[in-house]
Image (cartoon, rainbow, N blue to C red):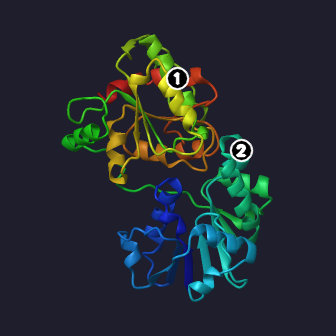
C-alpha cells in the first residue's frame, strides 16, 4: 500500500505542539517497512532533513517550489493540483493539519484535528487568523475526510458538537512525549542551561526558585492570569503555605496548616515563542511592579527543554482551552510539580497527577502555588 503524507507544516520556521505531534507520529509510523510512503511539501523554505525517519528506502519526499499562498489559492478555487497525483498516486493520504488538500476522489483521506479553539474562543484570535480559518474551511474538509483522528476526547466531542461529524468517523489517538523528557541529574549541564537563558543563579543542579510557564504566548493560554497570581504572591512576600491533596479532577485542597515561606525571591519564567495577540502580555509585564522578577526567555531550543523543566520549582499551565496540551505531560515526566486548569482536555492529559484549578479564579491559582508546601521542600 502507498501512503501519502502532507508535511508542509514541518517547513515552518517555528515549532509548536502541532509540529511536535507530527514529528513524534512520523518518527514511529515511518519505522514501518511494509508500506511505501510518499511525503509532500512545497515552498522555498528548506525542510530540515536531520530526521532519521526521512532516510528509509521505502520513503520518498516530493517538493514543489511554489509559494504556499499561490498553492493554497489554486487549491481553494480550482481544486488543483491534486496532491496524490503529484506523488505518483497513493491509496491513503494523511493530513496532519487542515491545510487545503486537493485529492482525487478515489484516494482515501485521513485528517488530524488538534482542537477547535477558534470556534470555542474566537475572541482570542486575530482578524487575519479568523480570515485564514474561513479560507481553509476546516468544517468542509472534516466532512470530506474518510476518517478523522482527534488527539483527545475533548476534541472529538467538539467535532461532533460543532461540525456534526459522526462519532464512528472519529478515532482518538493521544499524543506521546519524547523519551528525553525525564529527571536529569547532570548538575553541570543544568547550570549551563540556567546561564544560557539568564535564569536565577543557584548552586549547580539545584532547582531554581521560579514558577515556569512554557508554551506559545497567546491569549487563550491565560498568561495574564498567571502574572496576576504571581503578583498577588509577591505582594504577600511571606504567606501561609498549605498542604495540597492531589485529588485529580476536582483539585480539592484541604488539610490546611500554617507555615511561613518566603516568596520574596520567587521569579516567574515565561518561555516560548510569541503568538498572535501577545502584546497585552508584554505590556502587562512592563507595567508590573514586579517586572524585574518576570523573565521572558523567548524561543527554547528543542534539546534544552528537558533541562528547563528540571530547573523549575513548579510548572503552571492555566490555559482556558487545549486540544491536548503537551507541556504539562513533559513537565510531569521531568518530575516537576504541575498545576493546570480543569478545562477542555487537560483533565484527560494529567489524570490524577496534577493540581487542577479554575483558570478564571486567580485566588485558586494563588492558593495552589502557595499550597505546594511539601513540593517546595522536595525540590530543594
Assign the N terminus to one quadrant of the image.
Answer: bottom right
Q: Residue at x 75, y 73 (%)?
A: 77
Assign the C terminus to one quadrant of the image.
Answer: top left
Residue under label 1:
229
Q: Quadrant of residue 49?
A: bottom left
- Location of residue 152 in the rendering, given as x and y in whole percent from the top left corner: 61, 53
Is any part of residue 91 visible from this angle?
Answer: no
The foreground one among 197 and 370 is: 197
- Location of residue 35 in the rendering, given as x and y in whole percent from the top left corner: 50, 84
Q: Residue at x 50, y 22 (%)?
A: 287
Residue under label 2:
122
- Location of residue 155 in the rendering, given as x and y in whole percent from the top left corner: 66, 53
The earlier-in-sequence mark between 2 and 1 is 2
Instruction: Answer left or right for 356 relative to 50.
Output: right
Distance from disc 2 to disc 1, alpha carbons, whole Å, reads 25 Å
Q: Residue at x 72, y 67 (%)?
A: 141
Please determine whether, in this image, residue 307 is positioned above or below residue 142: above
Helix, strand or loop at mark 1: helix
Helix, strand or loop at mark 2: helix
**How many numbered badges does the structure rendering display?**
2
Residue at far right of view: 164
Question: Closer to the observer: label 2 or label 1?
Answer: 2
Please determine whether, in this image, residue 67 is positioned above or below residue 15: below
Amino acid at each position: 500500500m502507498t501512503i501519502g503524507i502532507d508535511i508542509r507544516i514541518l517547513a515552518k520556521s517555528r515549532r509548536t505542539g502541532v509540529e511536535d505531534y507530527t514529528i513524534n507520529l512520523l518518527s514511529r509510523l515511518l519505522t514501518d517497512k511494509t508500506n511505501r510512503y510518499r511525503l509532500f511539501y512545497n515552498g522555498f523554505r528548506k525542510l530540515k532533513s536531520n530526521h532519521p525517519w526521512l532516510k528509509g528506502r521505502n520513503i520518498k519526499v516530493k517538493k514543489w517550489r511554489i509559494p504556499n499562498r499561490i498553492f493554497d489559492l489554486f487549491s481553494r478555487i480550482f481544486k488543483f493540483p491534486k496532491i496524490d497525483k503529484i506523488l505518483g498516486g497513493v491509496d491513503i493520504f494523511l493530513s496532519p493539519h487542515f491545510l487545503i488538500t486537493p485529492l482525487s476522489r478515489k484516494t482515501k483521506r485521513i485528517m488530524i484535528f488538534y482542537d477547535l479553539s477558534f470556534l470555542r474562543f474566537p475572541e482570542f484570535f486575530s482578524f487575519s487568523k479568523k480570515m485564514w480559518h474561513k479560507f481553509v474551511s476546516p468544517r468542509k474538509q472534516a466532512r470530506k475526510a474518510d476518517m478523522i483522528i482527534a488527539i483527545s476526547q475533548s476534541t472529538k466531542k467538539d467535532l461532533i458538537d460543532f461540525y456534526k461529524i459522526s462519532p464512528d468517523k472519529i478515532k482518538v489517538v493521544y499524543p506521546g512525549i519524547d523519551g528525553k523528557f525525564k529527571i536529569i541529574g547532570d548538575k553541570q549541564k543544568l547550570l549551563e542551561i540556567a546561564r544560557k537563558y539568564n535564569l536565577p543563579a543557584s548552586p549547580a543542579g539545584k532547582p531554581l526558585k521560579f514558577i515556569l510557564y512554557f508554551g506559545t504566548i497567546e491569549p487563550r493560554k491565560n498568561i495574564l492570569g498567571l502574572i496576576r497570581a504571581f503578583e498577588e504572591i509577591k505582594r504577600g512576600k511571606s504567606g501561609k503555605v498549605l498542604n495540597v491533596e492531589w485529588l485529580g479532577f476536582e483539585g480539592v485542597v484541604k488539610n490546611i496548616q500554617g507555615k511561613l515561606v518566603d516568596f520574596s525571591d520567587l521569579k516567574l519564567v515565561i518561555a516560548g515563542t510569541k503568538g498572535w495577540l501577545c502584546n497585552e502580555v508584554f505590556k502587562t509585564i512592563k507595567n508590573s511592579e514586579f517586572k524585574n522578577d518576570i523573565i521572558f526567555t523567548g524561543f527554547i531550543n528543542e534539546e534544552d527543554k528537558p533541562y528547563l523543566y528540571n530547573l523549575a520549582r513548579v510548572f503552571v499551565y492555566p490555559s482556558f482551552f487545549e486540544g491536548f496540551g503537551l507541556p504539562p505531560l513533559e513537565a510531569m515526566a521531568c518530575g516537576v510539580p504541575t498545576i493546570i486548569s480543569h478545562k477542555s482536555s487537560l483533565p484527560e492529559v494529567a489524570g490524577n497527577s496534577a493540581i487542577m484549578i479554575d483558570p478564571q479564579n486567580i485566588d485558586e491559582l494563588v492558593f495552589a502555588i502557595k499550597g505546594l508546601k511539601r513540593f517546595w521542600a522536595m525540590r530543594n
